[in-house]
Image (spheres, grey):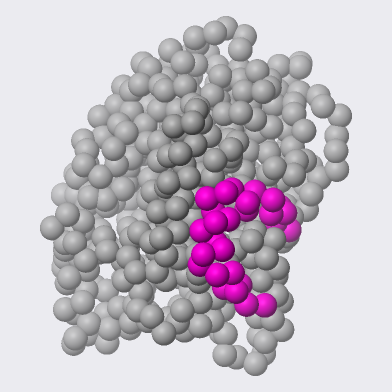
C-alpha cells in the first residue's frame, strides 16, 4: 500500500468538505458486547467525571512511574487510591491534536486535528455533546487548545490559567467548586487543563535540585545547560504536583468525591528531543490513573493497553449510555476499571506531521505491549523542530547540545538520532523504554515487523490517511478555513 497516493488537491477538497468523517473506526480493539443500559454510579446515580490534564510532562518523570529526580507526593498518593495504567498512549505528541483525541473519542485523521493549532472538522461532536445528551453539565477550566467552539461547547469555568507559554500558573479553586456544586443532583463533567510543565519553564524553584546529581535520560546530551534547563522543568513538575493536591482537596470539600470518577493524565512527553513532537515512547506514552471510590480497586495496576480515544466511550458507558458507536474510534475500557477484564487493545496507533512546528516530517507508528514499529515516510529529510531553534524563548539547552555534538560522541549520537532517521524503526519497547536499539534490520524480527507494518497500513487506510501528502502548510490552511467558515455560519 502507498498511503500518499491521494493527491494534494484531492486531500484539500476532502479536508474542507469533511469527507474523512466517513472513515471506519480503527481496529485492534477488543470491542465489548452491548449491555443493558444501567447506570453504574451506584443505586442508579450517574457518576461525576473530573479530568485533570498536565501539560507536556514525560510520564517517566513522575514518581509512581519510576521518576527519581523530583518528588510527586500528591500524584503518587492519588495513584495509591486509583488504578494505574502501565500502557496508556496519545495518538499525537502535540498539545492540540492529543486534546482533540481525548475530547472527541476520534483519532486525529477523523476529528480533523492532525497538526498543532489545527481545528476539528466541521460537525465533529465531543464529550460536551455525548455527555450532555445524558444529562451532564460539561465544563472546562484552564488550557483549552481545542476548536471550533461549536464542536467543544464547554461551560467556561474560571480559576486556572489559559495561556501555556507565558505565565505564572496562578490559580484559584473556588471556580471549580462552584461548578461542581452549582446544580444539586445534576451530574457534571469537568476538565481542568493545567499549564505545567509546558515550556518556558518559569514556575517553581529549580534551586532545590543538585544539578550534578540529576539522572539524565540516555537520550539526552550531558551539558551544564541541559542540566540547568532540566532542573527548571522538574521544578514545574513539582509545582504541578502541588496544584493537583489542591484540586483533589477542593473536590473533597464539595462532598462530591465519593461519586466522582477522577482521571489524571500527564498528556504527551516534555519539550525535549525524543519526547514531545515524536512518535517514540517518551513522547506518546502518558501517565494515566483513574480513581472511582467503591468501583475501582485502590492501588490497582493494569497492563491493559489504552489510548486517549477510549476515554469518551468509557465515560459514556459509565454514565449509562451506549458506548458502541460508529461515530467513535475508541472503545470503552469500563470493564478493565471494574476488574472484569485485564485486557483491552492489541494495538495503539500514532502519527506526527510536524506542521506548523517545522518543515513537514510525516511519521506513523503502531505499538503492542512488547514492540513499537515506526514508519518515517520521508527518511531522506532532516527533522527540524522550530521551538528548539529559538533559544531566547524556549531555553538554551539545544544550542549547547549541538555544540557538544562536535566533540562528544554521546551528544553526537543523540543529536543525529533526532535529526536524521531511518525509514523503519522497530523496538522491543517493554524492555528498551527509551527506544535506542533499532531492531528493524534484524532478520529474527522480520515477522514482527511485517505484522505491525501490515496493521499500520490497514489503520491508515481506514482513517483515509494520505500519508506524506497530508503534511503541507496548504492543508493546514484548508483546515483552518473550513473551521472558521463553519463558526461564522453558526
Res. 359 image quadrant: bottom left
Res. 428 image quadrant: bottom right
Query: How many discs mark residues in the rendered view?
Result: 0
Left or right position of 234 against 465: left
Vertical position of residue 385 compared to residue 89: above or below: below
Can residue 210 be seen from the camera position used here?
no
Residue at 45 percent across and 39 percent down: it is 485
x, y percent for residue 99: 48, 44
The front one of 302 and 375 is 375
Residue at 27 percent across and 83 percent down: it is 412
Residue at 70 percent across and 68 percent down: it is 458
Magenta-span inclusion, residue 160: no
x, y percent for residue 427: 55, 76
Residue at 79 percent across and 49 percent down: it is 31
Q: Which residues are magenta?
A: 1-27
Res. 413 image quadrant: bottom left
Vertical position of residue 378 compared to residue 190: above or below: below
Magenta-span inclusion, residue 5: yes
Q: Residue furthest top?
A: 184
x, y percent for residue 367: 61, 66
Vertical position of residue 422 compared to residue 259: above or below: below
Amino acid at each position: 500500500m502507498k498511503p500518499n497516493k491521494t493527491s494534494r488537491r484531492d486531500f484539500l477538497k476532502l479536508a474542507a468538505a469533511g469527507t474523512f468523517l466517513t472513515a471506519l473506526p480503527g481496529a485492534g480493539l477488543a470491542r465489548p458486547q452491548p449491555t443493558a443500559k444501567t447506570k453504574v454510579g451506584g443505586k442508579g446515580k450517574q457518576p461525576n467525571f473530573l479530568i485533570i490534564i498536565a501539560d507536556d510532562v514525560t510520564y517517566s518523570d513522575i514518581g509512581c512511574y519510576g521518576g527519581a529526580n523530583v518528588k510527586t507526593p500528591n500524584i503518587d498518593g492519588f495513584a495509591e487510591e486509583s488504578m494505574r495504567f502501565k500502557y496508556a498512549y496519545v495518538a499525537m505528541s502535540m498539545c492540540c491534536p492529543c486534546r482533540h483525541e481525548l475530547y472527541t473519542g476520534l483519532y486525529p485523521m477523523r476529528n480533523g486535528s492532525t497538526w498543532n493549532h489545527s481545528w476539528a472538522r466541521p460537525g465533529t461532536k465531543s464529550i460536551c455533546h455525548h455527555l450532555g445528551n445524558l444529562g451532564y453539565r460539561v465544563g472546562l477550566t484552564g488550557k483549552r487548545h481545542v476548536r471550533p467552539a461549536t464542536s467543544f461547547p464547554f461551560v467556561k469555568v474560571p480559576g486556572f490559567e489559559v495561556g501555556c507559554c507565558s505565565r505564572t500558573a496562578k490559580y484559584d479553586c473556588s471556580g471549580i467548586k462552584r461548578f461542581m456544586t452549582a446544580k444539586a443532583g445534576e451530574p457534571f463533567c469537568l476538565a481542568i487543563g493545567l499549564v505545567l510543565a509546558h515550556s518556558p519553564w518559569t514556575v517553581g524553584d529549580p534551586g532545590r535540585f543538585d544539578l550534578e546529581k540529576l539522572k539524565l535520560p540516555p537520550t539526552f546530551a550531558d551539558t551544564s545547560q541541559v542540566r540547568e534547563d532540566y532542573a527548571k522543568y522538574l521544578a514545574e513538575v513539582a509545582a504541578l504536583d502541588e496544584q493537583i493536591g489542591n484540586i483533589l482537596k477542593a473536590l473533597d470539600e464539595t462532598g462530591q468525591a465519593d461519586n466522582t470518577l477522577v482521571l489524571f493524565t500527564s498528556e504527551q512527553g516534555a519539550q525535549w528531543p525524543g519526547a514531545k513532537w515524536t512518535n517514540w515512547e517518551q513522547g506518546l506514552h502518558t501517565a494515566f490513573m483513574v480513581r472511582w471510590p467503591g468501583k475501582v480497586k485502590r492501588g490497582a495496576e493494569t497492563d491493559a493497553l489504552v489510548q486517549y480515544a477510549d476515554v469518551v466511550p468509557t465515560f459514556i458507558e459509565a454514565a449509562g449510555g451506549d458506548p458502541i458507536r460508529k461515530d467513535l474510534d475508541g472503545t470503552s475500557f469500563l470493564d478493565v476499571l471494574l476488574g472484569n477484564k485485564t485486557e483491552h487493545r492489541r494495538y495503539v496507533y500514532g502519527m506526527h506531521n510536524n506542521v506548523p512546528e517545522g518543515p513537514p516530517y510525516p511519521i506513523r507508528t503502531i505499538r503492542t505491549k512488547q514492540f513499537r514499529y515506526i514508519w518515517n515516510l520521508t527518511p531522506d529529510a532532516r527533522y527540524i523542530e522550530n521551538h528548539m531553534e529559538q533559544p531566547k524563548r524556549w531555553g538554551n539547552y539545544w544550542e549547547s547540545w549541538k555544540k557538544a555534538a562536535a566533540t562528544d560522541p554521546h551528544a553526537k549520537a543523540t543529536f543525529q538520532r533526532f535529526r536524521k532517521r531511518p525509514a523503519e524503526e522497530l523496538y522491543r519497547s517493554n524492555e528498551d523504554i527509551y527506544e535506542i536499539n533499532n531492531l528493524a534490520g534484524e532478520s529474527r524480527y522480520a515477522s514482527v515487523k511485517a505484522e505491525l507494518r501490515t496493521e499500520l497500513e490497514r489503520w491508515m487506510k481506514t482513517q483515509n490517511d494520505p500519508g506524506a501528502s497530508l503534511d503541507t502548510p496548504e492543508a493546514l490552511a484548508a483546515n483552518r478555513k473550513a473551521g472558521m467558515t463553519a463558526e461564522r455560519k453558526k
